[in-house]
Image (cartoon, rainbow, N blue to C red):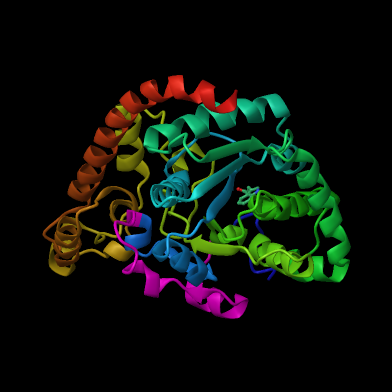
């Protein structure tokens, strides 16, 4: 399991191999089955799962289920963060009860971010953007780890009592050598993941990035020893950072991402200057041999974030591959998409400001 360190994400080169070695099932059978699914699911960004059949059954039989996922309040909200929330909104529309938490305890323990700062980031960067993206207040239970959810006492006790159900050897096998504060964070995350069950909802899904896989395994092991139902998971690939198909967007590296607060000019500059190109080395070569869309960050962003229309995406793919569409032109398509998205989004965010207060009070 040490292939993945949830506190220091390294880029995964071979997802198939990783899934095989860590016992994650392929999500592909559900990619087409789920109706009106968001782009992340339709285009295969969501790649793996544990026990998703239980969720599929709840959806088709209209049985109650909950989504629980968390956000790390450690910096600007950027496009790398959008994949999770689009899935959450999709399941909310399907009737799921939504549990969302701000991992402010973890941020303090592991990233040295104090409570006040984490609170500001969670509300102004994350929650506000979530609402603007379409998350609804109805059926939404939002909490901070430091304040806890409604049943705070049971939640806190659960995170501590879970410690009796594991050993240092197991912790080491799952996480490698970790510090006491990381162990506390991991136990708290297990309490988060099992929390909807304390409110009586036995079927839960936690959609997360692949970096969170160790927590998935840990929480399922602990759940089975504490008479909880096994929580279900989906795992999505991380959207690449601007520097290349296997780089990550990092909150501490503004040139690696586009944030929801970047201006039109910044969007233009970042994409023109940094977006890694899969195009030919020279114009002549590109025209002759074409480009490689699979490693081109502008193309990958269109595929996983911005170009909803399959026909248009295919056209872009084919034209780029054949060389008739140039790198500069591809970048302009992306710039246009990002800026028109952000323009609309900013209007929605103004409206969402009013809603924000009523959620936390
Ligand atoms: N560890 C997660 C992160 O780094 C945050 C988190 C805390 C979380 N508790 C959770 C995610 C429960 C999913 C479910 O982003």
Q: Quadrant of the N terminus?
A: bottom right
Task: Answer whether residue 7 is visible to the viewer in this image.
Answer: no
Q: Quadrant of the C terminus?
A: top right
Q: Position of residue 27 (x, y in %)?
A: 44, 71
Q: Of 35 and 144, which appears nearest the observer?
A: 35
Task: Answer whether residue 182 is visible to the viewer in this image.
Answer: yes
**Where is 111 relative to 218, above or below?**
above
Q: Residue at x 73, y 29 (%)?
A: 114
Q: Residue at x 74, y 37 (%)?
A: 108
**Where is 150 relative to 279, above or below?**
above
Q: In the shown orientation, is residue 222 left or right of residue 81?
A: right
Number of marks present in the image shown: 0
The segment highlighted magenta reads: 11-39
Q: Position of residue 330 (x, y in %)?
A: 21, 50
Task: State yes or no: residue 31 in magenta.
Answer: yes
Q: Position of residue 353 (x, y in %)?
A: 44, 21
Q: Position of residue 341 (x, y in %)?
A: 28, 36
**Where is 299 relative to 259, above or below?**
below
Quarter where residue 57 is shown: bottom left
């Amino acid at each position: 399991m040490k292939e993945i360190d949830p506190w220091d994400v390294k880029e995964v080169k071979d997802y198939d191999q990783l899934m095989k070695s860590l016992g994650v099932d392929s999500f592909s059978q559900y990619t087409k089955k789920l109706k009106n699914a968001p782009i992340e699911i339709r285009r295969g960004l969501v790649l793996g799962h544990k026990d998703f059949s239980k969720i599929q059954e709840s959806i088709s039989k209209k049985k109650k289920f909950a989504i629980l996922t968390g956000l790390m309040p450690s910096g600007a909200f950027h496009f790398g963060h959008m994949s999770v929330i689009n899935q959450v909104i999709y399941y909310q529309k399907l009737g799921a009860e939504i549990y969302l938490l701000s991992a402010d305890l973890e941020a303090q323990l592991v990233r040295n971010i104090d409570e006040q700062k984490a609170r500001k980031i969670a509300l102004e960067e994350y929650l506000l953007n979530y609402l603007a993206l379409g998350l609804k207040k109805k059926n939404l239970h939002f909490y901070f780890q430091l304040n806890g959810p409604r049943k705070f006492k049971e939640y806190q006790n659960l995170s501590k009592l879970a410690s009796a159900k594991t050993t240092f050897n197991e912790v080491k096998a799952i996480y490698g050598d970790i510090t006491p504060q990381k162990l506390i964070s991991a136990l708290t995350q297990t309490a988060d993941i099992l929390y909807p069950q304390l409110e009586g909802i036995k079927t839960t899904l936690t959609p997360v990035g692949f970096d969170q896989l160790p927590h998935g395994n840990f929480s399922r092991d602990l759940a089975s020893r504490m008479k909880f139902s096994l929580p279900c998971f989906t795992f999505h690939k991380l959207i690449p950072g601007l520097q290349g198909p296997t780089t990550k967007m990092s909150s501490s590296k503004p040139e690696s991402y586009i944030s929801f607060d970047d201006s039109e000019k910044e969007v233009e500059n970042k994409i023109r200057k940094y977006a890694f190109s899969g195009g030919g080395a020279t114009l002549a070569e590109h025209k002759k041999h074409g480009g490689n869309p699979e490693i081109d960050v502008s193309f990958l962003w269109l595929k996983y974030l911005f170009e909803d229309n399959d026909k248009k995406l295919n056209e872009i793919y084919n034209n780029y591959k054949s060389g008739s569409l140039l790198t500069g032109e591809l970048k302009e398509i992306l710039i246009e998409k990002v800026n028109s998205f952000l323009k609309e989004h900013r209007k929605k965010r103004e409206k969402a400001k009013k809603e924000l207060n009523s959620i936390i009070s």
